[in-house]
Image: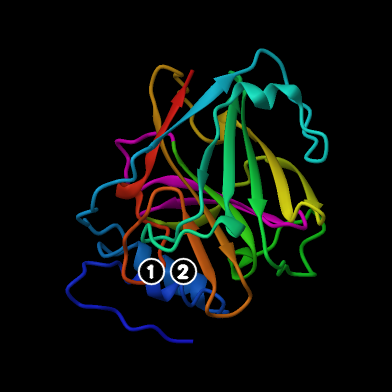
Amino acid sequence: MSFQVVPKFAVSKLSIALFMTRNYDHAQDQAIRILRSNHFFCTMLIPTMSAKSEIVAARVSHDIQLDSKHSAAEWELATPIRFSADWQGKNPDPTLETEVRVLWSPATLYLRFVCRYRDLFVFEDSDPNGRRDHLWDRDVAEAFLQPEPSSERRYKEFEVAPNGMWIDLDISPSGLADLMSGMTRSVHIDEQQRHWVAELSIPIRSLTARFDSAKPWRANFYRVEGRSEPRQYLAWQPTFTPQPNFHVPEGFGTLQFA
């Protein structure tokens, strides 16, 4: 699989080396080398953001029991965002619409994805705890969270698949690292309604040591569907790169805490 980089765009090499060819065994090592260079977090001129670039997390006063099949009533407190267009903000497809809701308590951030699908493509093997490298090479829902917007080169990546496999990553200029966040999840596939639901519980201490609900975070949410090209790369806030690339932090939206 190969892709041509358009020179007139200041696109990071990593968008090709890892996030388009990351199914190769050497991709992560190559990515770390690129991350250490100044090319990864290039400055890009992002076209007009989508009209709604803010998601609001609703506060809960107690722990939420994850149950993707019979979701807790507290999820109705959160106003959802929905997206079905690709990473360039084009080609909306209602059959792939994704809904995201966010809840928070002083100790935990909760995410809920409802993902419409046409077909399902998942891995059959993982670590005993469900973690799976290169999870992005099959169907996933993704959340990129940046608790410190002033540190544009640092953010956290969370991915979950329709069968419950997951991965969490800490992304920084020095490389990629397993976050080991302590995230838990619940996933359910509703074949009749043609959607799958994933609920995530993430300890806030794994995201930031100085949580202040009065200060907004930066965030973006994505979907990938398919096993081989052409695949579907969907984004809440478009990244506008020539080739699919979700790692454009300057294009993130805002996560507010109500």
- Residue 104: where, in percent of width, then height? 59, 24
The amino acid beneath tag 1 is: Ser
Where is 249 relative to 112, above or below?
A: below
The residue sitting at 25% across, 78% down in the picture is 6
Amino acid at dot 2: Phe
Q: Estimate the x, y position of residue 61 in percent, counting from the top left.
A: 66, 12
Viewer-proximal residue among 50 and 130: 50
Q: Which residues are magenta?
A: 147-173
Is label 2 in contact with label 1 (beta carbons under 8 Å)?
Answer: yes
Give the residue at x 26% y 65%.
39
Residue 171 within the segment the image draws in magenta? yes
Disc marking residue 19: 2
Residue beneath the point at 29% across and 79% down? 5
Q: Is residue 49 magenta?
A: no
Q: Callout 2: helix, strand or loop?
A: loop
Residue tagged 1: 15
In the depicted view, which residue is nearer to us: 82 or 13?
82
